[in-house]
Image (cartoon, grey):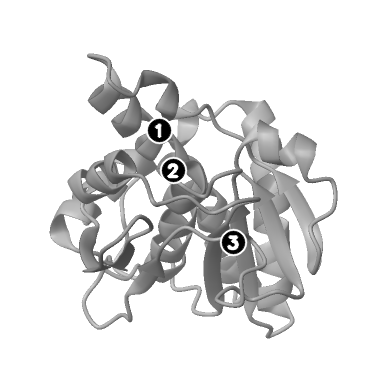
Amino acid sequence: MARTTSHNSLFPSLQQTTDNLISRFDTICLERKDLLKQLTSFVQQRVQAGQTVYLNFICTHNSRRSHLSQLWAQAASHYYGIKSVQSYSGGTEATAFNPRAVKAMSEAGFDIAKIKEGDNPMYEVRFADGINPVTSFSKVYNDPFNHNKDFAAVMTCSHADENCPLVFGATARIALTYDDPKEFDGTQQEAEKYKERVEEIGTEILYAFSQVNKAKNESAL
């Protein structure tokens, strides 16, 4: 699936990763595409209404999958020219943006710089020239840093989905869960599994936003 000139550019290494993931859209199973339709529909409805799209990706510790999803969503919205998207992440408790996940996203092409040290470091994440960086650190989902009303709560881990039945302020709830690469920490498969999760989440998030872009282009005809 070739990239067209109507798409916004990303940093070269991230663009290469993105092109590779877009070529994998056909590998997404129908069950997952049905789940992704919920995300596409939420974004599309807000875009058509001229509203800002607020997404909060939630995982228990806000350390891995929720961050990966948030950053891919912000990059995908830029790539497909959907300017009204603001993505956040949070957990049911705060820990830290895991350094293994930070490394895996850096290797995918995101420019990640640590701007605050400590047990819960703060990072600035960039994915394209001329775009404000995303500030990333671990937090609870309703931290004042996040937008806390009229947002879609996207549950990226089954534990949070099962144990957080009510997400205050959310107007939509989407269970888009992924396996935790944490299970492979300290093993020979660690790097491989983090890369695998980065690419799986990236492929699915890019696909969801590609469908928003497709609907936007069709409505303009």
Q: Are marks 2 and 1 in contact (CB under 8 Å)?
A: yes
Q: How many residues crowd around disc 1 within 10 Å: few (fewer than 14), some, or many (20 or more)?
A: many
Report the side of 46 relative to 122 (left or right). Answer: right
SS for callout 1: helix
How many badges with numbers are in the image? 3
Q: Amino acid at mark 1?
A: Arg
Q: Secondary structure at mark 2?
A: loop
The three-letter code of the residue at mark 2 reads Arg
Residue labelled with disc 1: 197
Q: Which mark is residue 48?
A: none
User: At 50% from the left edge and 73% from the top edge, which residue is drawn?
Assistant: 82
Q: CA distance from mark 2 to mark 3?
A: 26 Å
Which mark is nearer the camera, 2 or 3? Answer: 2
User: In the rendered image, is residue 24 in sight?
Assistant: no
Image position, residue 153 (x, y; %): 70, 57
Of the numbered discs 2 and 3, the one sitting upstream in the chain is: 2
What whole-number distance in Å separates the C-alpha atoms at marks 3 and 1? 23 Å
- The quarter of the rendered structure image containing the N terminus is top left
Q: Can the viewer see residue 132 in this picture?
A: yes
User: Mark 2 — residue?
Assistant: 64
Q: As displayed, is residue 28 above or below residue 102? A: above
Which residue was labeled with disc 3?
A: 212
Between label 3 and label 1, give the one nearer the viewer.
1
Q: Residues within 10 Å of mark 2 (few under 14, many from 20)?
A: many
Dot 2 or dot 1: first in sequence order is: 2
Q: Verify CB contact (< 8 Å) between mark 3 and mark 1.
A: no
How many C-alpha atoms fall within 10 Å of the one at disc 3: few (<14), some, or many (≥20)? many
**Amino acid type, mark 3:** Val
